[in-house]
Image (cartoon, rainbow, N blue to C red):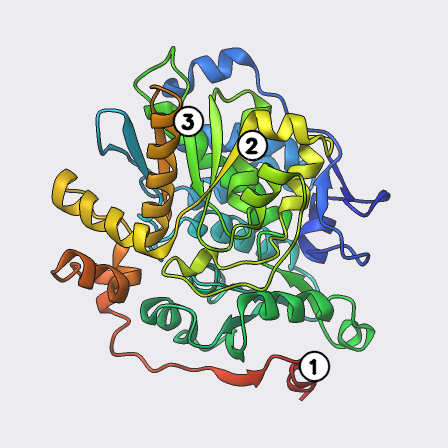
Amino acid sequence: MLYYSTNNRQATTDFRGATIEGQPADKGLYFPAHLSKLAPSFIDRLQDYSRAEVALEVIRPYTGDCLPEDVLKRIVAETVDFDFPLVPVTDTVFSLELYHGPTLAFKDVGARFMSRCLGYFARGEDRPYTVLVATSGDTGGAVANAFAGIEGVSVIILYPSGKVSHVQELQLTTFGGNISAVEVDGSFDDCQRLVKQAFTDRDLAERYLLTSANSINVARWLPQQFYYFFAAQQWPYKDEPPVVSVPSGNFGNLCAGLLAANAGLPVRHFLAACNANDVVPRYLASGLYAPAQAVATLSNAMDVGDPSNFVRILELFGHDPVLIRAALSGCRIDDETTKKVVADLYNENNYLADPHGAVAYEALRQYLTAHEGGRGYFLETAHPVKFFDAVEPVIGTAVPLPDAIKALLGKEKKATPLAADYASFKDWLLR
């Protein structure tokens, strides 16, 4: 399998090269030269396979010959070694809970897969790989946990000061060792801009073997297909494909779902569920793509004004807006509605959602109402405890603390504060 840059189809590399490089030098994103199509017989018999077997079948075409079969099997098995339950919420709506991994967020899947791939690729290198990653919340903790102690790899995480939850900050700033955190005085878009600029800096290239663990990296992005297949294993209405609502920020997760559907997974329709940062819903309504400065919301992991992975969605559909709209609709949910949904789900349905899940639930509810029926599921991407400061005032009680969070509360935050300008970041890297 080869990957080309979305800015230059002639700039190609294999899975190993795309993983290590992270982003092409021309600032595009790597995209598969051929899209995998799964056998209908495999799709029809998903329930007959284990999660690890399903994940292996899905990802094998994209890794090609870069990973030996036994190594890929081990990596996949370790990646999906926790539950992904599809939980009924109402008569027509289910929640796909993706927070049962080590950092209680959906990004555990991509981070675990990538960390193990990069650890394998790093063997024999004369200097460690350095992973640069920007986070709007959950990516940082998932990457820190997945890469902690991985030989041959060091990690630098940039996050926007005051714009991640307290729990998220603890998850990404308390490891030490091969994990460093940088607290940027700015937005997630500022963090992402600094990371992208670093990849094009020749001075840094002489010092570091740089790669990224954001969903711009194919090894982070592609495994996110897995849990859509895990949902299909549990979907009880085999003759009625679901509508799937995805809380969307940088759009890697939704793009992975669209890729899974392209491979043959039955899905009736996808919803891009967004908060006030609604650049993609506005594009779907008007045909005009106009990035904007990100604004802070309750669902902070979706506070992205210029989502990197949207270019991959365009690529997947050949930049044809008619095809995109046939597969995908957008919805904007504001903070007041988000609060009400969290409260209503808790009080009326005995279901505790985090703000991101609440946005996705409401987008799905509105769509099913407007289209007179059908069923679907939304992605509950993080445990509500990660946003206890937003959730508890709404539900009027404390969110129970999982053991993984209890262990964090007494730890010391370790982060370097920096201005949101590239000169400061570069000076710190070359210190």
The residue wearing badge 3 is 243
- Could you tell me residue 127's position as x and y percent? 69, 71
Above or below, comparing residue 151 to residue 60 in the picture? below
**Which of the pair 349/13 is nearer the observer?**
349
The residues bearing labels 3 and 2 have C-alpha atoms spaced at a distance of 12 Å
The residue wearing badge 2 is 258
- Could you tell me residue 344's position as x and y percent? 19, 45
Residue lying furthest front: 286
Asked if labels 1 and 2 touch by Cβ distance under 8 angstroms, the answer is: no
Residue for point 66% across, 71% down:
194
Q: Secondary structure at mark 2?
A: helix
Callout 3, which amino acid? Val
Residue 152 makes an appearance in the image: no
Asked if labels 2 and 3 touch by Cβ distance under 8 angstroms, the answer is: no
Disc 1: CA contacts within 10 A as few (<14), some (14-19) or many (>=20): some
The residue wearing badge 1 is 426
Disc 3: CA contacts within 10 A as few (<14), some (14-19) or many (>=20): many
Above or below, comparing residue 94 to residue 78 in the picture? above
Q: Is residue 112 left or right of residue 237?
A: right
Callout 2, which amino acid? Leu
The quarter of the displayed image where residue 90 is located: top left
- Mark 3 or mark 1, which has the lower sequence index? 3
Which is closer to the viewer, label 3 or label 2?
Answer: 3
The quarter of the displayed image where residue 246 is located: top left
Q: Is residue 300 left or right of residue 166?
A: right
The residues bearing labels 3 and 1 have C-alpha atoms spaced at a distance of 45 Å
Which is closer to the viewer, label 2 or label 1?
Answer: 2
